[in-house]
Image (cartoon, rainbow, N blue to C red):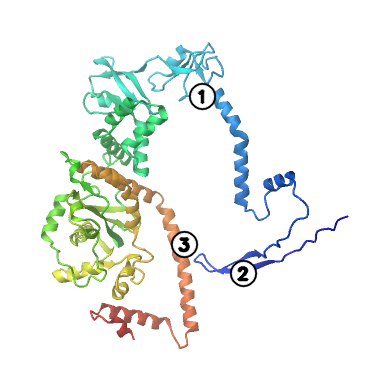
């Protein structure tokens, strides 16, 4: 008899971890740390059965997520071969009885059902005025049906001049087919196609039309995922095995005025601004004050949203007009009347913006060098300006003046958060205009650390009253979304570019306003918890201070600090001593 192996037990060491967060009281957790296992040789060899058992049996230290993930993977491995077998079986008829009349059936429609089959008579009856593409069984496989597609006019056109027209139609699945369409001389062909659920490729004598659900999907993909027309056409090609000629036909029909007008038509239909102009068109924040209160606005510029001079010109104005982007003529007039070529002396952040980032040779090829914009504290887009001369001070001044003009006859105090308010304030004082009484300037929470100490004290959102926990970086988050459209818009004509960017901004505002109530509740909950922690910290400082300190003393220190920062003497640190 051999000697039994001696087992050694090791004690688990538990480490106590105390975490203090804004979520309330301190949380206590324990981390188990086992001592290293002994390195001894096994006297018994491990059999293959034991090794297989060890691989399939989860260890005690395995997490619940890993166990659930393994169970899910094993479940898919168990059914994937059966699912492939079923998909092959579905390639042949499951039954030969028509689901309507029970006669012999050779046709099926995948868009209606994967299990239903039809005879020719029932197929024509159930698919009247339908753009579904049925298939016929040829005893080997299903092939596209030779039955033509027809679209008939509804009742009420019997006494009118009705004529037929053969058109190319891209149906909702993305396949290109030929359809015989009934037209009536009592209305334009584009309106008749719209009754059929089709969007024409041209406004006059259209030869090609698109399924409206297909274009609605493209609009959503272009606004949310920044999919280009070319990328969408290639996607439909590989999905439906289209030929190169069919893809080129699809691209030529889709690019240009057709998709721009459909996107604008889709916006007008959803917003209902043409039926009731008093309705919100997507440019008004539901939570910002309308007549009385404080309105926090963030300003910033983006030098990635450029436009090349070689991208052509526009013969018409943008479809959205000045819904988001202001009239460029008004901006040019304002720039001519507000010359700010000299750099203010108090530029503590050494602000250079995009002029240093882009060479003069590159700038000559651009007629739009960037976009300057404004959004509210809830990140709803408000106003945007095309820039052609770098980030001059005239652009933020123009936006501020426009915001003040919109707030005329209202008791609204405008709190502006901008990267360089110190430069703006210095310029306003130097020009003799001064800062209006209903405006407060501040620096975003992230950019404030690029300024000198006096500016941090005077303009930080964390030190000024009325800004709360607003970080002022809302425009940076907006730019991260809008910047992805640059690769498409830089090659567009001016009107098409503004329309697409406006649609993108309206979509961004819709995203923010839809879930605004949840965002406000989360911010309120966070603010209440931070207030509790701040009160605890102040009480702790007062209690542990070596001398007698009160909250009134802290307020005096804060006021004294602000007074010293507002002085124009340079060595502020020496004054604090």
**Which mark lies nearer to you, 2 or 1?**
2
User: Which secondary structure, mark 1?
Assistant: loop
Q: Position of residue 389 (x, y in %)?
A: 17, 56
User: Which secondary structure, mark 3?
Assistant: helix
In the image: residue 84, left or right of residue 265:
right
- Of 236 and 528, the residue lying toward us: 236
- Work out whether 70 lies above or below 437: above
- Work out whether 140 lies above or below 385: above
Residue 433: image quadrant is bottom left
Q: Position of residue 376 (x, y in %)?
A: 31, 57
Point out the tag, 1 or 3, that comes first from the N-terminus.
1
- Of 305 and 463, the residue lying toward us: 305
| Marker disc for residue 312 | none
Instruction: Give the residue at x 64% y 53%.
Output: 62
- Of 508 and 574, the residue lying toward us: 574
Q: Position of residue 18 (x, y in %)?
A: 57, 69
Disc 2 and disc 1: Cα gap in Å? 60 Å
| In the image, farthest residue toward the right | 1
Instruction: Give the residue at x 65% y 56%.
Output: 61
Point out the tag, 2 or 3, that comes first from the N-terminus.
2
Task: Report which residue position mark 1 lands on.
Answer: 114
Instruction: Give the residue at x 35% y 72%.
Output: 463
Report whether residue 361 is seen: yes
Disc 2 and disc 3: Cα gap in Å? 28 Å
Task: Report which residue position mark 3 lands on.
Answer: 525
């Amino acid at each position: 008899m051999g000697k039994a192996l001696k087992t050694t037990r090791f004690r688990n060491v538990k480490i106590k971890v105390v975490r203090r967060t804004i979520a309330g009281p301190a949380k206590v957790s324990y981390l188990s740390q086992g001592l290293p296992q002994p390195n001894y040789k096994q006297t018994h060899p491990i059999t293959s059965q034991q090794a297989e058992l060890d691989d399939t049996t989860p260890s005690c230290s395995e997490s619940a997520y890993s166990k659930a993930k393994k169970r899910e993977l094993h479940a898919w491995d168990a059914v994937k071969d059966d699912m492939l077998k079923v998909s092959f079986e579905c390639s042949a008829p499951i039954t030969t009885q028509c689901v309507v009349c029970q006669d012999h059936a050779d046709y099926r429609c995948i868009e209606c059902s994967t299990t239903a089959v039809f005879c020719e008579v029932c197929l024509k009856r159930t698919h009247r005025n339908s753009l579904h593409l049925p298939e016929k069984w040829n005893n080997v496989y299903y092939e596209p049906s030779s039955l033509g597609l027809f679209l008939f006019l509804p009742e009420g056109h019997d006494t009118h001049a009705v004529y037929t027209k053969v058109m190319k139609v891209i149906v909702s699945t993305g396949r290109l087919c030929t359809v015989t369409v009934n037209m009536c001389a009592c209305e334009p062909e584009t309106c008749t196609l719209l009754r059929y659920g089709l969007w024409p490729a041209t406004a006059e004598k259209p030869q090609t039309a698109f399924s409206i659900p297909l274009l609605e999907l493209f609009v959503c993909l272009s606004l949310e995922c920044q999919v280009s027309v070319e990328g969408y056409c290639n996607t439909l090609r590989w999905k439906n095995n289209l030929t190169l000629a069919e893809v080129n036909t699809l691209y030529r029909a889709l690019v240009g005025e057709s998709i721009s007008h459909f996107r604008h038509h889709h916006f007008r239909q959803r917003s209902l601004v043409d039926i009731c102009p008093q309705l919100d068109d997507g440019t008004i924040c539901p939570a910002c004050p309308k007549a009385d209160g404080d309105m926090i606005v963030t300003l910033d510029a983006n030098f990635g949203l450029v436009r090349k001079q070689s991208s052509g010109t526009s013969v018409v104005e943008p479809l959205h007009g000045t819904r988001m982007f202001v009239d460029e003529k008004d901006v040019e007039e304002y720039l001519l009347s507000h010359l700010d070529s000299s750099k203010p002396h108090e530029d503590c952040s050494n602000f250079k913006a995009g002029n240093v980032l882009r060479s003069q040779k590159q700038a000559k090829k651009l007629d739009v060098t960037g976009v300057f914009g404004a959004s509210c504290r809830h990140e709803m887009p408000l106003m945007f300006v095309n820039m052609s001369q770098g980030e001059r001070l005239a652009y933020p001044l123009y936006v501020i003046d426009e915001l003040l003009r919109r707030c005329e006859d209202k008791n609204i105090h405008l709190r502006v958060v901008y990267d360089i308010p110190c430069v703006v304030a210095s310029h306003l004082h130097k020009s003799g205009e001064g800062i209006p009484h209903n405006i407060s300037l501040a620096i975003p929470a992230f950019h404030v650390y690029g300024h000198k100490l006096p500016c941090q004290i005077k303009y930080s959102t964390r030190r000024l009253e009325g800004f709360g926990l607003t970080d002022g970086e809302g425009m940076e988050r907006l730019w991260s979304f809008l910047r992805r459209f640059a690769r498409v818009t830089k090659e567009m004509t001016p009107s098409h570019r503004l329309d697409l960017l406006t649609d993108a901004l309206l979509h961004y505002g819709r995203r923010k306003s839809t879930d605004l109530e949840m965002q406000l509740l989360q911010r309120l909950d966070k603010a209440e918890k931070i207030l509790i922690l701040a009160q605890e910290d102040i009480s702790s400082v007062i209690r542990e201070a070596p001398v007698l300190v009160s909250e009134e003393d802290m307020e005096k220190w804060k006021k004294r600090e602000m007074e010293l920062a507002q002085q124009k003497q340079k060595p502020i640190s020496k004054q604090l001593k």
